[in-house]
Image: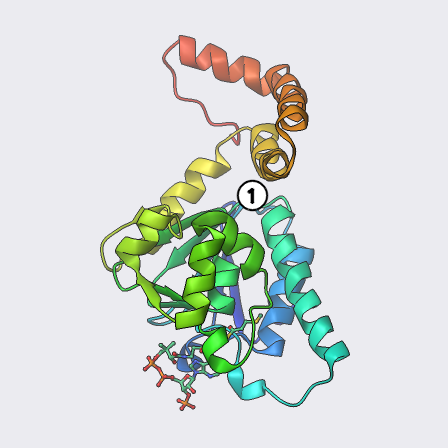
Amino acid sequence: MTDHAFTQLAFEMEGAVAVLTLDRPDKRNAVSGVLIREINAFFAAPPKEAKVVVLKGAGEHFCAGLDLSEHKERDVQEALEISRYWHKTTEMMQMGGLPIVAALKGAVIGGGLELAISAHVRVAEPSTFYALPEGRRGIFVGGGASMRVGRVIGFGRVVEMMLTGRSYDAEDGLRLGLSHYLVGEGGALAKAHALADQIAGNAPLANYMILQALPRIGEMSPAEGLFAEELATALTQTSADARAGMEAFLKKQAIRFDR
Ligand code: 1HE
């Protein structure tokens, strides 16, 4: 994977953390066809040594969404395939097994919000604002916002956001769950790295269950979900890491599972 020659995505390893930067600051990191393919390529084959991803945007904005300059007449089949490709990409982000911590600032708009909401932890700065202007541009969300943003803030708010084109500011975003942390201006990246380091130190099986079992359990009926939770807890609690983790707690010792 590290052999990929990315042109609109910057990538570097910092220990076990893969730092991924949407890297078109002069275009506010708008997602071109090239950029979505590069994001897809990264998550399809992430570096083996990566345990966590920190995702950020270069410059003053996280991401201004779909690159509108690439809009052209398309037939239904082509448009379906582009949306499907975004769905495959964001599915790999959410369910691919690598925890993603997003550092947000400035615009988190349209497809930018669809990328951010596919991350597992979101840290925002006061400049952050969120919008789904698709309805106002004569288009529709195509990268998973209907499902993922609706699950976080409620479908009624997504309908209202899209009808009116309103933005939520950083405070609103924190209250609604669009971000999990709101830090000072310029502080999102450091906080994202601190959280990534903490996540990298968790037991791998616990992280696996958190990422793979929890979202699926959320889609199940209560009876099925509770049964799935029994299986997930039995598998994690009987692991060697669980024994070490509980022993460390009882001895009042800190423990990391990656060293
Ligand atoms: C772009 C894009 C873009 C900026 N596609 N080129 N997204 C939107 O509707 C958001 C559109 N963008 C904006 O509202 C603003 O650009 C921002 C609030 C993000 C930033 O404002 P500002 O004043 O800092 O920058 P700017 O002067 O508006 O833009 C700087 C350059 O970036 C300019 O290009 P230049 O060649 O004239 O310098 C802009 O044209 C360019 N730029 N945003 C293309 N989005 C899977 S479906 C998802 C569907 C969607 O995402 S729809 C939402 C699209």
Left or right: 169 in relation to 23: left
Q: Residues within 10 Å of mark 1 (few under 14, many from 20)?
A: many
Residue 211 coordinates in the image, percent (x, y): 58, 39
Residue 2 appears in the rendering: no
Where, by quadrant of the figure, is residue 2 drawn? bottom right
Residue reaching furthest to the left: 184
| Residue positioned most to the bottom | 73
Of the pair 53 and 49, the residue shown nearer to us? 53
Quarter containing the N terminus: bottom right
Q: Amino acid at mark 1?
A: Lys
- Residue 157 x %, y %: 42, 57
- For residue 201, say whether it is visible: yes
Give coordinates of residue 190: x percent, y percent: 33, 51
The correct choice, above or below, for 46 with respect to 130 in the image is above
Looking at the image, in which quadrant does ligand 1 appear? bottom left
State which quadrant residue 64 falls in: bottom left
- Disc 1 target residue: 51
Instruction: Residue at 49% x, 75% y: name it.
Output: 135
Horizontally, is 90 left or right of 134 in the view? Answer: right
Q: Which is nearer the eye, 147 or 237?
A: 147
Whether residue 40 sits left or right of residue 250 in the image: it is right
- Spot occupied by residue 74 in the image (x, y as percentages of width and height): 69, 86
Q: Residue at (43%, 51%) from the top-left corner?
A: 153
- The residue at 61%/32% (across/down) is 209
Quarter where residue 84 is shown: bottom right
Dot 1: what SS?
loop
Which is nearer the eye, 13 or 26? 26
